[in-house]
Amino acid sequence: MISIVILGGAALSRGALAAVLAQEGDLEVVPEPPEPAGGAVPRLAVVVIDLDRYGVDGPATIDRLAGELPEARLLVLTGRRAPELLRRALAAQVWGLVSADTSPERLARLIRQVAAGERVIDPDLAAAALRASENPLTEKEQAALRLAAVGMRSREIAERLHLSPGTVRNYLSRAIHKTGARTRLEAIRRAQAAGWL
């Protein structure tokens, strides 16, 4: 019996996927723990994670889960083709990276492959990851740009990040330069398109 934990996505879609997978005789969907931790997830479970539902925190969530659940096998579903996001997922040594449009029947087959120790990577997603350019932004530049993307002004960003407004302006200016943009808004769009935010 293969234990599966489904993370991310709306409760309704998780429930529907769990119901479909539970009809497979060799697959058992176990309840999602409130906070993933080593003891709460079966040691050799396949953890199916809907990356898109975590938004900008998706790659960090994968990194965290890979660290907290080293024996679990992460199978990532995503509909996004943001190259940096895909590269980060692959760098986290996930066992599977597949399109969110995958049918439940195919997903069941992929879960079995992952449980058997085989890595499954969607060729289109792999190609998109290979086309990615390195993220030129530092963590602070990304954080400032991310807050600017939700409409915060430099002073508000400075308060949130515990920095001076001048330092924030410098971070945003460097982010604009590194993305090859002319404005803050253009820098945000380019960074989001590249999956850097």
Image (cartoon, rainbow, N blue to C red):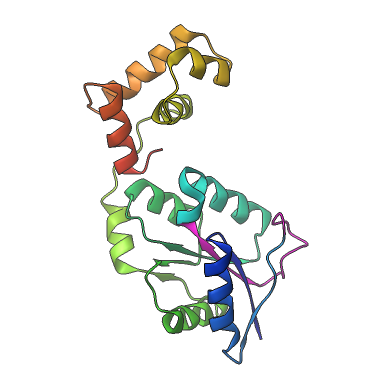
| Main secondary structure found in the magenta portion | loop
Above or below, 58 against 137 in this view is: below
Quarter of the N terminus within the rendering: bottom right
The front one of 124 and 188 is: 188
Q: Position of residue 160 (x, y in %)?
A: 56, 21
Magenta stretch holds residue 38: yes
Query: x%, y% of residue 38?
Result: 74, 59
Question: Where the C terminus falls, by quadrant?
Answer: top left
Rendered position, 131 above or below 42: above
Tell me if 91 is positioned left or right of 63 in this view.
left
Q: Position of residue 37 (x, y in %)?
A: 73, 56
Q: Residue at x 36, y 37 (%)?
A: 135
Residue 170, by quadrant, is top left
The magenta region covers 34-51
Q: Residue furthest right?
A: 39
- Tell me if residue 163 is in the magenta stretch: no
For this orientation, the residue located farthest to the bottom is 25
* Residue 84, horizontal then vertical, whole percent: 37, 46
Q: Residue furthest front?
A: 12
Q: Residue at x 37, y 60 (%)?
A: 79
Residue 4, picture quadrant:
bottom right
